[in-house]
Amino acid sequence: MRFFVPETDDDSDAERIYAALAKLAGVPVPALGQRIYLISWVDSERGEQMKAEVGRALRGVITELVRKRSPKERTTRRTYKEVLAIFPGEPVKVVLRAWPVTSVRSSWENPIPVAGSTIKKVTHFE
């Protein structure tokens, strides 16, 4: 996937917005080869398998064992705000289209800090 920032008009606009999001996240602007497109991790606090993909809604899946007559799994899928950028580092920072980027509030801290030990998959932009 070629590098982009959602809803930008051209490469220079994308770079300008990306730099502003990096500043918000408190990180330096990463080089092209270090920019993250997708990350998945386990959020142990919420019990969710999370997937953040730039330009798509943050997604979480909870799988629970339901014990009634016979044990079976129940899966709950959740979607959250759109992912605008993902920045490498420790922790990785996932920036959502939510406060303080917009006036819309989220149940997530923004940017979301993701500890390296919880990360299952990372895909970089080409």
Image: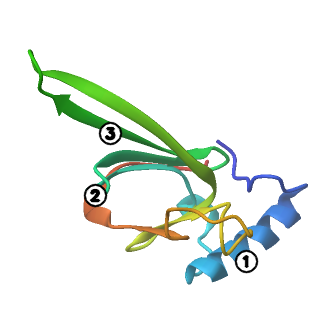
> What residue lies at 17% left-to-right and 31% top-to-bottom?
65
> What residue occupies the far front of the structure in this picture?
68
Q: Is residue 53 above or below residue 74?
A: below
**Mark 2 vs 1, N-terminal side:** 1
At x 67% / y 47%, what residue is drawn? 55
Residue 3 location (% of width, % of height): 69, 52
Q: Is residue 85 left or right of residue 17?
A: left
Of the residues shown, which amino acid type is indicated by label 1? Ala
The 10 Å Cα crowd at callout 2, few under 14, some 14 to 19, many 20 or more, is: few
Q: How is the image coloured?
A: rainbow
Relative height, residue 58 to residue 117 (above, below): above
Q: CA distance from mark 2 to mark 1?
A: 27 Å
Q: Residues within 10 Å of mark 3 (few under 14, many from 20)?
A: some
Marks 2,3: beta carbons within 8 A: no
Q: Amino acid at mark 3?
A: Ile
**Labelled disc at residue 98:** none
At x 23%, y 34%, the residue is 64
Q: Please, is residue 69 above or below residue 35 in the view? A: above
Residue located 66% across and 71% down the image: 99
- Identify the amino acid type marked 2: Thr
Question: In the rendering, at what x and y percent does residue 97 appear?
Answer: 68, 60
Gap between marks 2 and 3 measured at Cα: 15 Å
Q: In the figure, is residue 125 to the left or right of 76?
A: right
Q: Which quadrant is the N terminus positioned in?
A: top right
The quadrant holding residue 101 is bottom right
Q: CA distance from mark 1 to mark 3?
A: 33 Å
In the rendered image, which residue does mark 3 sit on?
A: 62
Q: Secondary structure at mark 3?
A: strand
Q: Which residue is mark 1?
A: 20
Give the left or right position of residue 6, taking residue 45 as reference.
Answer: right
Rendered image: mark on residue 118: 2
Mark 2 vs mark 3: in front: 3
